[in-house]
Image: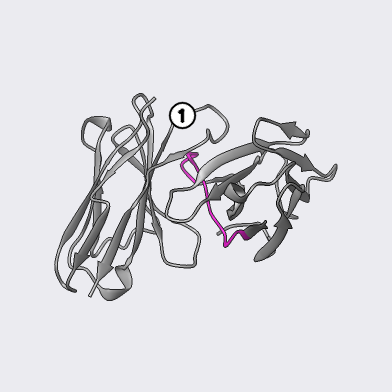
Amino acid sequence: EAGVAQSPRYKIIEKRQSVAFWCNPISGHATLYWYQQILGQGPKLLIQFQNNGVVDDSQLPKDRFSAERLKGVDSTLKIQPAKLEDSAVYLCASSLRRQGRVAEAFFGQGTRLTVV
Amino acid sequence: DAKTTQPPSMDCAEGRAANLPCNHSTISGNEYVYWYRQIHSQGPQYIIHGLKNNETNEMASLIITEDRKSSTLILPHATLRDTAVYYCIVRVANPQGAQKLVFGQGTRLTINP
């Protein structure tokens, strides 16, 4: 079974530039998550999709971050404009939807973003 | 925010059992305890989960106390490849009813040769 695919693997940009990350979840997984992981910290949920609808974006900095999941499959996360504090690993994860509890989530390798 | 407390770091000798504790004193009756681990430069990996009974799979065992206020993840025969950050997570529901995983700081487990 193919895992969660993310690209690019690494990205270096200057502050105030824009950047986009792409995620292809495991086939059939209705739930998709984007996490931000700053060095030395645990992953922080940015946004959660159920199919192509947003169910939780309470921690997404909406003035600069945006995400979409077209057709309920692939997803993109965009930052515009980037700040130095956005330097982090951006992780995509997907899971099946199971009534009443959280199904195990499968994570991609992540995209390491460095803002200089 | 995460509702779990874990020691920041632990060491274990290769071949011995690694016992990772987690406190979750405010856990609700219908909340599950999940364990994930993150090996350096990789995404988190699911290990095991449980509600109130002890659980075992090919990777680990999960022991949950009778009052469910704490749990212990056991790696029975730790190897060097088990060196990672281990996260204990209690399922958190958002107002719309969707579930999400909230990660804390985790425990950095180092397996020594």
Q: Position of residue A11 (x, y in %)?
A: 22, 60
Q: Residue at x 72, y 32 (%)?
A: B56
The stretch of residues the image draws in magenta is B95-108
User: Image quarter for residue A58?
Assistant: bottom left
Secondary structure beneath dot 1 equals: loop
Callout 1: few (<14), some (14-19), or many (20+) C-alpha neighbours within 10 Å? some
Q: Position of residue B103 (x, y in %)?
A: 54, 55
- Name the foreground residue: B41 vs A5: B41
Query: Is B102 in the magenta?
Result: yes
Tell which subunit mark 1 falls on.
A
Q: Residue at x 71, y 49 (%)?
A: B27
In this picture the colour scheme is one colour
Is residue A37 shown above or below A29? below
Q: Name the residue carrying label 1.
A: A97
User: Image quarter for residue A107?
Assistant: top left
What secondary structure is the magenta-colored segment mainly?
loop
User: Image quarter for residue A90?
Assistant: bottom left
- Name the foreground residue: B20 vs A78: B20
Is residue B34 shown above or below A16? above
Q: Residue at x 61, y 50 (%)?
A: B80
Q: Quadrant of the N terminus of chain B?
A: bottom right
| Residue B41 falls left or right of residue A74 | right
| Amino acid type of the residue that numbered disc 1 sits on in the rendered structure | Arg
The single residue placed furthest to the left in the displayed view is A17
Query: Is B82 in the magenta?
Result: no
Q: Position of residue B10 (x, y in %)?
A: 69, 62
Q: Quadrant of the C terminus of chain B?
A: bottom right
Q: Residue at x 69, y 46 (%)?
A: B78
Is residue A57 shown above or below A62? above
Q: Position of residue A19 (x, y in %)?
A: 18, 59
| Residue A6 falls left or right of residue B17 | left
The single residue placed furthest to the right in the displayed view is B66
